[in-house]
Amino acid sequence: MTLSGIAFIVILLFVQLGVQDALYTSATYLHQNLRGDLFLISSQYNSLTSQHSFPRPRLYQALGFKGVETVIPLYLQFAKLKNPIDGRKFPIYVIAFDPGKPILNLAEVNQSLQSIQLPDVVLFDRLSRFEFGPIAEKFEQGKLVIIEIFGYNKSIGYRVKVGGLFTQGPSFGVDGNLIMSYSTFLRTFQERRAGEIDIGLVILKPGADIQQVSANLSAYLPKDVKIFNRQEFITFEKDFWSRRTPIGFVFSLMVTMGFAIGIAVVYQILYSNISNHLAEYATLKAIGFKNNYLLGVVFQQSLVLAFLGYIPGFAITLEIYNLANNVTNLPVFMSVDKALIVLIATILMCSISGLFAMNKLRAADPADIF
C-alpha cells in the first residue's frame, strides 16, 4: 500500500507533465520544421491559430537588407473539411506556399512537392483525427481520393484531389492538416488576398550575423510586423499557450496540485509508520541514540520510498504514454528531462514529507512509552 501510493503520485506527475509537454510540442511543430533563419509575423499575432496576416510587401522589403539571401511567404488558414463518408464538416488547418521554394524540413513533404505543383492537389496529414474519415487509408490503397474544403463561414465548397500524405499530427488547437500550393490556396479561399500573408520566412546568406540582421529589420521595418529568430518564435508560441489560455494555466495548476497531494500522501505514510513503531524509536532513545540519528533513519526511509515508488510508477507511465500517443496522435512521450524532473520531484516530495513526519519522532518520550 505504501509503495502503491507513491507510485500513483509518480504516475500522476508523469501524466500531467507529459500532456503539458504534448501541448507545447504539438503547438510548435510547424515552428520547429520551418526553413528560415528569421520569421516575420503581424504585430497582432498571438499564435498560429489566431490568423493575423500582414502585407506581403513587408516581406520583400527585407530583401533589401544586408545579409538576406531570399524570402518566402507562407499562407495559413482554418477551413472545414467534409468527411467523404458521412458528409459532416470538421475544422482543418491549411498550410500553403510556393512548391518551387520548399519551406518545411519534412522529407515526406519535400518528396511530394511535384504533386502539389499540379492545380487543386493537396497533401493530407495521415495523423489527422479520425473525424475526417478514412482519407489516408483510401489513398494508401491506391484509390482516387477527392475531398471538399469549405471556407470557415462558407456554404459552397471547393473540391481537391489528395496527391500525397505527410506526418505532422494534431495539436490542442488543430485537429488535422492540409498542405497545398499557394495558387490552389487562393482558388480555394477566394476571400483571401494574395497580398496578405501569415508568416514570412527570411533565409540569410552564409556567415550572416543573425542577431544583427534581426536588429536591423526590427529597427527599419514598419511596426506592423514583428521579427523573431527560431527560438524566439517557439518561445512566443509556448508563452501564449502557457500564460494566455485557460488550458495552459490548468496544466500548471494540476502539476502543482499533484506535487502538493504527493507531499500529503507520503506524509501520511511516514507518520503512520512512525506511529506504529513509536515504541522502537523510544527504546532507541532510551539506550542513548540522539534525535539526529533517528531523524536520519526517517530521512533514509523517505529516500528509499521515493526510489521504490518511482520505479513502478515510471514503468506504468511508459504504457500510459504509449496508449495516449496511439489514441490521440499527440506527441506524448518519455524523455530524459521528464524522467529526471519527476525523479527529483519525487525525492523532494518524500524529503519534505519526512521533515514534517519527524515532528512525531521528536515528541517520542521513553517515559511515556514505558
Image (cartoon, rainbow, N blue to C red):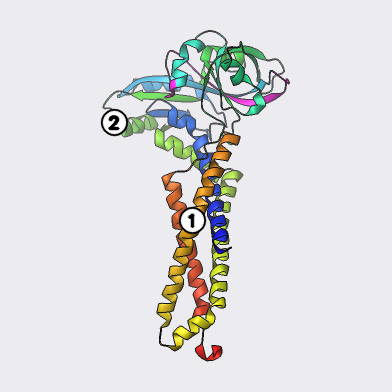
As rendered, which of 50 and 85 lies closer to the eye?
85
- 203 relative to 353 in the view: left or right: left
Q: Is residue 349 placed above or below 147 in the rendered structure?
A: below
- 9 relative to 214 in the view: left or right: right
* Residue 216 pos. (x, y %): 34, 30
Q: If you read the primary sequence from the N terminus, does the residue marked by circle 2 or circle 1 appear first?
A: 2
Residue 184 visible within the image: yes
Q: Residues within 10 Å of mark 2 (few under 14, many from 20)?
A: few
Q: Residues within 10 Å of mark 1 (few under 14, many from 20)?
A: many
| Residue closest to the far left | 207
Q: Which residues are magenta?
A: 85-107
* Residue 268 pos. (x, y %): 58, 69
* Residue 333 pos. (x, y %): 49, 40
* Residue 51 pos. (x, y %): 56, 28
Residue that numbered label 1 is attached to: 310
State which quarter of the image contains the C terminus. Answer: bottom right
Q: Tell me, yes or no, whether the highlighted magenta stretch contains residue 189.
A: no
As rendered, which of 29 and 36 lies closer to the eye?
29
Residue drawn at point x = 49 percent, y = 62 percent: 349
Residue drawn at point x = 68 percent, y = 15 percent: 157
- The kind of residue on which mark 2 rests is Asp
State which quarter of the image contains the N terminus. Answer: bottom right
Mark 2 to mark 1: distance in Å?
A: 46 Å
- The kind of residue on which mark 1 rests is Tyr
Query: What SS does tag 1 mark?
Result: helix
Query: What SS does tag 2 mark?
Result: loop
Name the image quarter holding residue 261.
bottom right
As rendered, which of 221 and 348 lies closer to the eye?
348
Residue 57 visible within the image: no
- What's the mark number on residue 209? 2
